[in-house]
Image: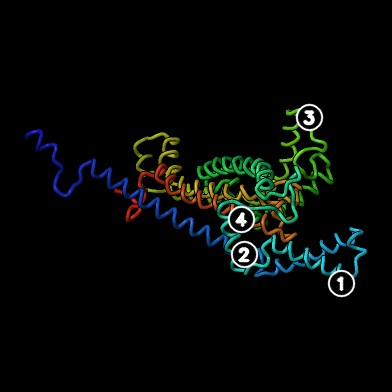
């Protein structure tokens, strides 16, 4: 057989170059469609958030009342305005109220205000907060979020990483000892996950801070903050103990039970029994044939948990007086501070969409059966 004959592809099969071009086209098409769908989802989510945050115009009525009250206060505090004739004073108040309402766009139609606000939100042009301010005194929503975000990431990022690896190794250990004492203990403790972390935080504060006085009640560091960076780090870690304990109690047991069940299911597959019959080491079997098939599920659970790290937990951070983005959002909701509420939601929506988009590619890396844009979703 000649070299020319050997180089020709078999009938019904594509050449490697053609297959590569088809795969690239398929991935590009899938990526484009996926990005468009996720962006439309973000747009709908932000639009609904703006509608709910403004309560169909009720918040605008509150803002109109506050504007009139502020202008009245200025008129009372200014002697020149206070000494005017009643008719002139009312005219001055009405003029200034109209100027302020026009500046805030309250005279535009509701749908126009909503569309403009959504456009600014999508472009991250979040404007100024109505009531809240950053520690530097700025009322720019972007600066408020950027100032609070690192403290939220420190707490929940550290907690999620620690608990993720703890849960993973604990689940693997329990899958090796099905029905053991500790396996029954974890199953018995899973109902504890029915309550949120802040619920257990109250009891932990009561026990370790109020009764035994061995841990701080709350906050991020001692007051005043230590000047030495090592002492500052130690103070920070001390203040993180109770929040991480509360998160562990509220979420670890069900996660360990969930992962341990997956490991048990995959460890009873026929190919695992075949690997054991071939004499492969237990660690290799566990890593290749038990842990690897469950990685997509575990990674999905972990990454979606990290999404909520970026927005914090409003009640949780409030209970522990943690100066993060969740506590700021809690304050914004109480004050009807729409820009901060929408800003936090925009941040969450973008990060959630990006995480969902990246998960598709991560699945391809951890599971060779998955291919992007395939009709059936898997390759032979």
Measure the C-alpha gap from mark 1 to mark 3. 59 Å
Q: Earlier in the sequence, mark 1 or mark 2?
A: 1
**Which residue lies under the disc numbered 1?**
87
**Which residue lies under the disc numbered 4?**
345
Residue under the image location 74 percent in, 49 percent down: 133
Q: Is residue 252 visible?
A: no
Between residue 72 and residue 91, name the one nearer to us: 91
Mark 3 secondary-structure assignment? loop
Q: Answer left or right for 240 relative to 277.
A: right
Between residue 320 and residue 9, name the one nearer to us: 9
Residue under the image location 59 percent in, 51 percent down: 124
Give the number of the mark in front: 4 or 1. 1
Q: Earlier in the sequence, mark 4 or mark 1?
A: 1
Q: Which circle marks residue 113 in the picture?
A: 2
Give the number of the mark in front: 1 or 2. 1
Q: Earlier in the sequence, mark 4 or mark 3?
A: 3
**Which residue lies under the disc numbered 3?**
227
Give the number of the mark in front: 4 or 2. 2
């Amino acid at each position: 057989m000649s070299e020319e004959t050997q180089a020709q592809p078999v009938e019904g099969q594509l050449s490697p170059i053609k297959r590569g071009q088809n795969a690239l086209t398929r991935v590009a098409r899938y990526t484009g469609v996926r990005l468009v769908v996720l962006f439309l989802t973000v747009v709908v989510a932000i639009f609904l958030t703006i509608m709910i945050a403004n309560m169909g115009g009720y918040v605008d009525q509150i803002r109109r009342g506050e504007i009139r009250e502020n202008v009245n206060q200025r008129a009372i505090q200014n002697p020149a305005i206070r000494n005017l004739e009643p008719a002139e004073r009312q005219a001055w108040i009405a003029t200034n109220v109209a100027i302020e309402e026009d500046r805030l766009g309250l005279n535009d139609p509701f749908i126009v205000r909503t569309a403009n606000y959504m456009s600014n939100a999508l472009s991250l042009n979040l404007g100024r907060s109505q009531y809240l301010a950053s520690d530097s005194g700025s009322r720019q929503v972007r600066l408020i979020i950027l100032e609070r975000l690192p403290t939220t990431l420190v707490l929940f990022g550290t907690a999620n990483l620690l608990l993720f690896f703890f849960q993973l190794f604990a689940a693997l250990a329990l899958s090796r000892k099905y029905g053991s004492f500790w396996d029954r203990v974890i199953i018995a403790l899973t109902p504890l996950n029915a309550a949120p972390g802040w619920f257990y935080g109250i009891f932990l504060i009561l026990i370790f801070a109020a009764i035994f006085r061995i841990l701080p009640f709350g906050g991020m560091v001692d007051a005043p903050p230590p000047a030495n960076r090592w002492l500052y780090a130690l103070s920070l870690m001390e203040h993180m103990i109770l929040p991480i304990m509360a998160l562990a109690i509220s979420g670890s047991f069900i996660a360990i039970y969930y992962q341990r069940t997956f490991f048990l299911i995959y460890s009873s597959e026929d190919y695992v029994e075949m690997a054991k019959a071939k004499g492969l080491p237990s660690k290799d079997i566990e890593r290749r044939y038990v842990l690897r098939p469950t990685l997509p599920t575990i990674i999905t659970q972990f990454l979606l948990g990290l999404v909520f790290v970026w927005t914090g937990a409003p009640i949780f951070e409030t209970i522990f007086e943690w100066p993060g983005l969740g506590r700021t959002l809690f304050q914004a909701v109480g004050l009807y501070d729409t820009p901060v509420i929408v800003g936090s939601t925009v941040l969450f929506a973008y990060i959630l969409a990006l995480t969902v988009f990246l998960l598709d590619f991560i699945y391809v890396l951890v599971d060779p059966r998955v291919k992007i844009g395939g009709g059936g979703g898997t390759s032979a």
